[in-house]
Amino acid sequence: MSSSVIGFIRASLISLLVGVVMGVLIAAGVFSGACKPQLITSAHAHVNLLGFMAMLIFGVGYHILPRFSGKTLYSEGLATAQLWLNLVGLVGVFTGLVAGAYTDKDLLLYMVAPFGAVYALGAIVFTFNMLKTMGGPAPPPLAPPKPPGS
Ligand code: HEM
Ligand code: HEM
C-alpha cells in the first residue's frame, strides 16, 4: 500500500474511535452543558461521516480503483496533497463544531465554513485524480518470464 493509502486508513480508524466514543458520551449526557447541543451532535455525525466513512473510502478507493480499472494512478503527489487537505479540513470542522457548541461566537461561519472548504477541496482533488486515472493509460505490460536455465 502507498503511504497516502496508509494515511487515509489511519485517519479513518482514529476518526471511528473518536466518533463512537463521542456517541456514547452524548448519550450519557456528558455534553449537556453546551449552549448549542445540536453542534455536538453534528461534530459526532461529521467525524463519523467525513472522518471514518469518507477517509476509508478515499484510502480503499486509491488502492483498488486503479487496479479494478487496469490503470496506473494519475498522481501519487495529488493523493498526498489530498490527504493533508482532508486532515486539516476534518480537524478544523470537528474543532469548530465542538467549540461552537460552547460559545456565542458564530464558529460555523469562522471555522466550519473555511475548514469545510479545505475538506471540500480535498474531495475535488480526489474526483480529479480518479477521473484522470480511469481515463488514463494502462500500465506497461510485464516482461515475459525468462526461460529456465537462461
Ligand atoms: C457507539 C456508536 C455510536 C453511538 C453510541 C452513537 C450515538 C449517537 C447519539 C446519542 C446521537 C444524537 C441523537 C440525537 O440527539 O438526536 C447520534 C447522532 C448521529 N450519529 Fe451516532 N452514534 C454512534 C455511532 C455512529 C456512527 C458509526 C455513525 C456514522 C457512520 C453515526 C452517525 C450519526 C449521525 C449522522 C447522527 C446525527 C443524526 C441526526 O442529526 O438526526 N453514529 N449518535
Ligand atoms: C466539509 C464538508 C461538510 C461541511 C462543512 C458540513 C457542514 C454541515 C453543517 C454546518 C450542518 C448543520 C449543523 C447544524 O447546524 O446543526 C450539517 C449537517 C449535516 N451534515 Fe454536513 N457538512 C459537510 C459534509 C457532509 C457529508 C459529506 C455528509 C455525509 C456523508 C454530511 C452529513 C450531514 C448530516 C447527516 C447532517 C445533519 C445531522 C447533523 O449534523 O446534526 N455532511 N453539515
Image (spheres, helix red, strand yellow):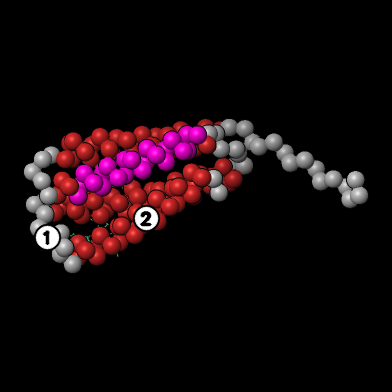
Q: Which mark is residue 23?
A: none
Q: Ligand 1 near label 2 (Cβ, under 8 Å)?
A: no
**Residue topped by disc 2:** 14
Q: Nearer the viewer, residue 147 or 10?
A: 10
Q: Main secondary structure of the magenta part?
A: helix
For the C terminus, the image quarter is top right
Q: Secondary structure at mark 1?
A: loop
Q: Mark 1, residues whose alpha carbon is within 10 Å: few (<14), some, or many (≥20)? A: few
Residue 27 found in image quarter: bottom left
**Residue topped by disc 1:** 32
Q: Please state the total of marks drawn on the protein image.
A: 2
Query: Is 88 one of the magenta-colored residues?
Result: yes
What residue appears at the point 33 percent right and 48 percent down from the top-left corner?
Answer: 50
- Say which amino acid is labelled 2: Ile
Q: Residue furthest bottom?
A: 28
User: Along the polypeptide, which appears first: circle 2 or circle 1?
Assistant: 2
What residue appears at the point 39 percent right and 52 percent down from the top-left corner?
Answer: 12
User: Residue 130, image x and y in percent?
Assistant: 49, 37
User: Residue 120, image x and y in percent?
Assistant: 33, 37
Instruction: Tell me where the magenta segment starts and ends, as one range.
Output: 77-98
Q: Nearer the viewer, residue 10 or 60?
A: 10
Q: Secondary structure at mark 2?
A: helix
